[in-house]
């Protein structure tokens, strides 16, 4: 597989694309990310936002959940999405939403995703997305919506640390499903239903957080699993195996380690 970026950009050191906490993006970085998402939403082919969102649920229904492959499948999903995103803005990477942070437990969703408009006065593409599928059925949503719960009900740092302390791969992948599901339900609306969740722009920030947690677990458990037989399994529709996505550096990205957020 190609491990390089589709574009020549990349914000990281050593050629790695650096994924950051969305609350740590500078205003220029956030503007560039929003611009790239907005551009990707205008692309009508398989490199476009709607096509990519449609891989997860309607119409392709290719996502895997509640199975050992679930983390690897979503890592591949984000990997290809990010390449197509970078095509629309050199150096743009997927940010993560840390739903355990103080600001999330106070304010809920990051303002990057809830602002009605961006600094330029144009609509914020991270607020919601149009859902464009072939042959829509009666009752299908035309755009995404949210119905967030009380911020206090988001998963906590303790919840995450408990899971990260697990040393068994089977325990880790099973128990990491829980905060993942909890956040989908917490956002509510489109995010709360598997057939549509990937259309909500915040889906990608949520799964980036989940992927980051898996990476943090991998750093602590370098031989932790999955077993060799599972590593050979394919992750359709992506032309990669579980083994291909085990090493994020081989995939060309890294998670920013600095977690210093100035609470204002
Ligand atoms: Cu999910």
Image (tube, helix red, strand yellow):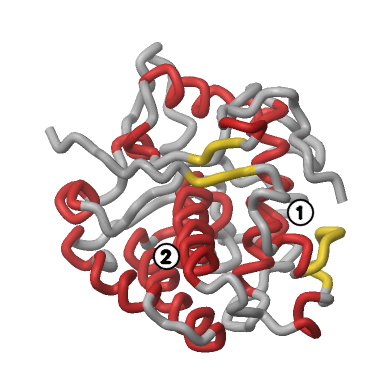
Rounded to the nearest angstrom, the CA distance separating label 1 from label 2 is 26 Å
Instruction: Indicate left or right for 142 with 106 as reference.
Output: right
- Which label's residue is closer to the chain start, 1 or 2? 1
Q: Secondary structure at mark 1?
A: loop
Q: Residue at x 58, y 70 (%)?
A: 222
Q: Toward the viewer: 225 or 122?
A: 225
Quarter of the image where one finds residue 11:
top right
Residue 174 visible, this orientation: yes
Residue that badge 1 annotates: 135
Quarter of the image where one finds residue 132:
top right
Instruction: Indicate left or right for 261 with 49 as reference.
Output: left
Instruction: Indicate left or right for 208 with 111 as reference.
Output: right
Residue that badge 2 annotates: 184
Closer to viewer: mark 1 or mark 2: 2
Q: Toward the viewer: 85 or 199?
A: 85
Q: Toward the viewer: 134 or 208?
A: 208
Residue 204 image point, x, y percent: 53, 50
Residue 156 image point, x, y percent: 24, 67
Q: Residue at x 28, y 74 (%)?
A: 159
Pointer 1: residues within 10 angstroms few (<14), some, or many (20+)? few
Label 2 within 8 A of ligand 1 by Cβ: yes
């Amino acid at each position: 597989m190609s491990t390089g970026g589709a574009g020549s950009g990349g914000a990281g050191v050593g050629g790695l694309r650096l994924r950051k906490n969305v609350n740590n993006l500078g205003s220029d970085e956030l503007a560039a990310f929003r611009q790239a998402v907005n551009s990707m939403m205008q692309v009508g082919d398989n490199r476009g936002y709607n096509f990519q969102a449609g891989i997860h649920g309607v119409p392709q229904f290719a996502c895997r959940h509640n199975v050992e492959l679930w983390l690897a499948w979503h890592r591949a999903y984000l990997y290809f999405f990010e390449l197509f995103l970078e095509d629309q803005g050199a150096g743009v990477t997927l940010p993560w939403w840390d739903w355990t942070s103080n600001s999330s437990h106070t304010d809920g969703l990051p303002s990057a995703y809830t602002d009605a408009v961006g600094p330029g006065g144009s609509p914020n593409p991270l607020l919601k997305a149009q859902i464009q599928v072939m042959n829509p059925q009666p009752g299908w949503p035309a755009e995404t919506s949210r119905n967030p719960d009380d911020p206090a009900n988001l998963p906590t740092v303790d919840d995450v640390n408990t899971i990260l302390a697990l040393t068994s791969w089977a325990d880790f992948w099973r128990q990491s499903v829980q905060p993942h599901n909890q956040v989908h339900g917490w956002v509510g609306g489109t995010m709360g239903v598997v057939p549509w969740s990937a259309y909500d722009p915040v889906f990608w920030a949520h799964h980036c957080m989940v992927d980051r947690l898996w990476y943090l677990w991998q750093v602590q458990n370098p031989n932790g699993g999955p077993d060799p037989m599972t590593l050979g399994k394919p992750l359709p529709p992506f032309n990669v195996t579980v083994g291909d996505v085990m090493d994020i550096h081989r995939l060309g990205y890294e998670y920013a380690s600095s977690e210093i957020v100035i609470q204002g």
